[in-house]
Image (cartoon, rainbow, N blue to C red):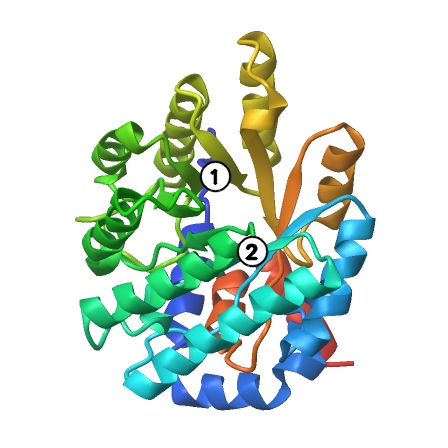
Amino acid sequence: MTTMAIDLNPYFRKLILVATHNPVVAKIVNAYGMRLGASRFVAGESFDECAPKLQQLNRDGFKCNTTILGEAITDRALANQVTDDYISILDRIERDGIECNLAVKLTQMGLNIDEELAYANIERLVRHAWAKGNFVRIDMEDSPLVDVTLRIYTRLRDAGYDNVGTVLQSYLYRTGDDYEGLIPYRPNLRIVKGAYLEPPTVAYPSKSDVDARYLILTKDMLAHNVYTGIATHDTKIIDAVIEYANRNGISRDTFEFQMLYGIATNLQKDLVARGYTVLIATPHGPQWYFYLMRRLAERPANVLFFLKNLFR
């Protein structure tokens, strides 16, 4: 008699994401998180704390981006202030000679208040980045925001900005169609699996389906000479992408691997040693709670690391 193996990871992930909104969990993690290991995944609560880590990553051969952690801003003045903060970071990056671009959420720019406010803020930021020779990636958020995110991205491209990219999530059923619509823009895209809790009517519930879609989309991007940020720590996918690129003569200049600060550091170093471009997403800011909980949900090992520090 054979025993069928059950993949518990999807159940574990859902449990963590649901617990994220429990006020008791939030209070405990916010009170003790940085001391208990959140600093492994978050490069500081300010850019002053983050900058030396970015510089060390550059010395180790990595590209970087940074994000001010936080989302769902509902105050117009605060959305404008966050945009100003990002502009100051661009100035600091240029001044200190750091190889680092930005990844931003439109909900930080005021999207939950007004689409035009979000567009005005992201256009102001992208324009400043263009003047500095830098790049801004618009992160993708949960599924209700995909349409407006792509609408703002294509509006920026239509306005002539080529220093802006966005993100596609392989677990959404709609992503193939979204990708086809972006091809005429010759976009700079990051491909991720997806970290938000989505219903099965919107997203593939099976990890194997998500992984399969990820590879299909990535290979098509490479085949169409779309600059692709392959954001994964999954060694099976990484190996498959490298094999596909080698077999089809795809230049390493047309893609990069993107990984998270503090996760799979040996893999990151190995890829750099093999001559691949690796970008480390290096977030900072005091509003790190939701980011940390999504990282814990992705891998049981991350929770074990966190709990081990709790009981030291």
Q: What is the three-letter code of the residue carrying label 2?
A: Lys
In the rendered image, which quarter contains the C terminus?
bottom right
Percent across and percent down for residue 166 are 38, 47
Percent across and percent down for residue 125 are 42, 63
From the viewer's perspective, is 52 left or right of 89? right
- The correct choice, above or below, for 253 with respect to 5 in the image is above
| Residue that numbered label 1 is attached to | 5
Q: What is the three-letter code of the residue carrying label 1?
A: Ala
Q: Nearer the viewer, residue 133 or 122?
A: 133
Q: Quadrant of residue 275?
A: top right
| Residue that numbered label 2 is attached to | 132
Badge 2 crowding class, 10 Å Cα cut-off, few under 14, some 14 to 19, many 20 or more, is few
- The correct choice, above or below, for 86 with respect to 246 in the image is below
Percent across and percent down for residue 309 are 73, 76
**Element type at marker 2?**
loop
Q: How far apart are labels 2 and 1 at the CA level? A: 53 Å
**Element type at marker 1?**
loop
- Say which of marks 2 and 1 sits in front: 2
Q: Quadrant of residue 43?
A: bottom right
